[in-house]
Structures are given as structure tokens and as C-alpha cells.
Amino acid sequence: MRLLQALGIILVTALAAPQPALAGNADEINASANEALHKFVEMNPSAHELGRKAAGALVFPSVVKAGFGFGGAYGEGVLIVHGNAAGYYNIVSASFGFQIGVQAQSVIILFMTEEALAQFEQSYGWKVGVDGSVVVVNLGAAGAIDTDTLTSPILGFIFDQQGLMYSLSLEGSKISRITP
């Protein structure tokens, strides 16, 4: 049992540590983010209008979560402002509890106001739920997004889940700038 706990602690420590050396290159991240955005809009046609209203979009094309008692998640993405890459980031989280499995998912965080975007860009190690409250949007029937009733300054979308672990939470995730 102690060996299992030690392995769990090592896994969480490895996932939670900033890892700029592991960052993919900018072209790879941009291409993956572009593909994720197209898939998101294809699945949710009203997402295009919501994206036009946003001050910026943080796109993590693949966030991999794994857990066996202890768990963690890691992904790399790009902040897009006015159609251009404005910085590269990673998302890291750690968890403890009843969990087992591996999952990959795409995450898009929309900053709906200039103030929310500026607060994010000026922070170092932005923590979801602490530095900014992200409302994770559940999609309605047929993937419809009601762009008129969403009024939160920061919206999160989790989609394209693949694997055996199911989670629709970003709470406790830390987002940090990386150099691809």
C-alpha cells in the first residue's frame, strides 16, 4: 500500500510541476488548437457567434487526465486574441479520491470581457476558481449554446472526451505561461 501511495505522490508531483521543457512547438500547438476550434464549431454551430463576442479564447486541444487514487491532468494550449496567438500555456491539476482511468478531452476557455482577459494575462500561475471563476457550460439539446443568456465573464467548454474517466470540472486547475 505504501508503494502505491509513493507512486501516486510521484505522479502528482510530476504532473503539477511546471514543465516548459516539454512544451510542444508553436506550430504544433497552433495546428491542434485550430483543429479543436473547428471541431467545436462543427459540433455547436452557435459557438461561432459566441467566439466572435469573446475578448479572447484559451484553447487546450488535448488535456490528458489519469488517476488511480491519486490523479493528475496536463495539456498545452494557445491564447487567441483577435485571431492571433497571444501566448502559450499549460494546464495542470492534481486530485485525490476515488478515481481510476485515463481520459483525453479538449478544453476551451472564453474570456467574454476585456477585464477578464487582462486579469488572466497579468497573472502568473492563474488558478481556476481562485484567480478566476470559470462557468463550465453544459450544452443543450443538439449541442445548442444560447449566446444571449450566457453572461459570465469567463466560460469553459469541455468536449470530445475520450477514455474511461469522466469529469467535467476545471476547478483547481492551474494555468501557466510556457515557451514553446
Image (cartoon, rainbow, N blue to C red):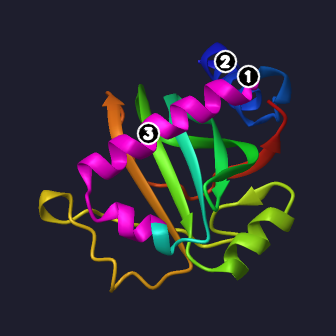
Q: State if disc 3 and disc 1 touch (CB < 8 Å).
A: no
Front residue (pair 135, 48): 48
Magenta stretch contains residue 49: yes
Q: Secondary structure at mark 1?
A: helix
For marks 3 and 2, give the CA distance. 33 Å
Q: Could you say where residue 46 lies in the image, as x and y percent from the top left?
A: 28, 65
Q: Secondary structure at mark 3?
A: helix
Furthest toward the front, the residue is: 83
Residue depicted at 48% across the width and 61% down the height: 156
Q: Which mark is residue 7?
A: 2
Q: Could you say where residue 91 lies in the image, as x and y percent from the top left?
A: 66, 43
Quadrant into which the N terminus falls: top right
The residue indicated by pointer 3 is 36
Q: Residues within 10 Å of mark 3 (few under 14, many from 20)?
A: many
Left or right: residue 135 versus residue 125 is left
The residue indicated by pointer 1 is 10
Magenta stretch contains residue 82: no
- Magenta stretch mostly in which secondary structure? helix
- Inspect the image, locate mark 1, and give the three-letter code of the amino acid beneath it: Ile
Left or right: residue 117 versus residue 176 is left
- Inspect the image, locate mark 3, and give the three-letter code of the amino acid beneath it: Ala
Residue 35 vs 124, above or below: the answer is above
Q: Which residues are magenta?
A: 23-51
Q: Residues within 10 Å of mark 1 (few under 14, many from 20)?
A: few
Furthest toward the top, the residue is: 3
Q: State if disc 1 and disc 2 touch (CB < 8 Å).
A: yes
Q: Could you say where residue 45 lies in the image, as x and y percent from the top left?
A: 25, 58
Front residue (pair 172, 111): 111
